[in-house]
Image (cartoon, rainbow, N blue to C red):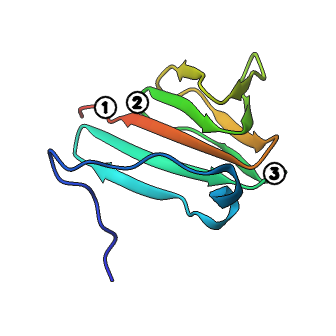
Amino acid sequence: MALHHATPGEIIDLAHAPERVPDDQSIALFKTPEVEVIRRVLDRGQSVPQHRVGGPIVFQCLAGAVRLVLTHAQPVLAAGQLLYIAPGEPYALEAQDDSVLLMTIVRRSE
């Protein structure tokens, strides 16, 4: 079964009760040639190995707290906070709590 991606004008519910976070799944909410928006769900202690993408990324923490391991810093992003990283900057993620991130990736034109 193919993943559902939202269509233009479709409402996406981002609200999560804290007790539901571990049961929810990471999912690409929508993807176009220019942008991809992902809801990333991480359990406390879970990490995502270092990688990079070609375009800029905006991380918005919706619940919990996540440490971003960047080249020159390791900020902890808490619920209600937003962080931008430059195109191609390597990053890793480490969940400090059960967490939900909204990741917006801008695709670079080739």
Residue that mark 1 sits on: 108
- Asked whether the viewer can see residue 10, the reply is yes
- Characterize the local packing of mark 1: few (<14), some (14-19) or many (20 or more) Cα atoms within 10 angstroms: few
Among all residues in the image, which is located at the extreme bottom?
1
Check the picture and name the quadrant holding the C terminus.
top left
Residue at point 48%, 27% (across, down): 58
Q: Are marks 2 and 1 in contact (CB under 8 Å)?
A: yes
Tell me the distance, in whole angstroms, between the alpha carbons under discs 3 and 2.
Answer: 28 Å
Q: Which mark is residue 44?
A: 3
Q: Amino acid at mark 2?
A: Gly
| Residue 56 located left or right of residue 90 | left
Mark 3 or mark 1: whose residue is earlier in sequence: 3
Mark 2 or mark 1: whose residue is earlier in sequence: 2
Q: Nearer the viewer, residue 24 or 66?
A: 24
Q: Amino acid at mark 3?
A: Arg
Check the picture and name the quadrant holding the N terminus.
bottom left
Position of residue 52 measured from the top left corner of the image (x, y, whole percent): 56, 38
Dot 3: element: loop
Position of residue 100 measured from the top left corner of the image (x, y, whole percent): 61, 45
- Characterize the local packing of mark 2: few (<14), some (14-19) or many (20 or more) Cα atoms within 10 angstroms: some
Residue that mark 2 sits on: 55
Relative vertical location of residue 51 with respect to residue 6 in this rendering, above or below = above
Picture quarter containing residue 78? top right
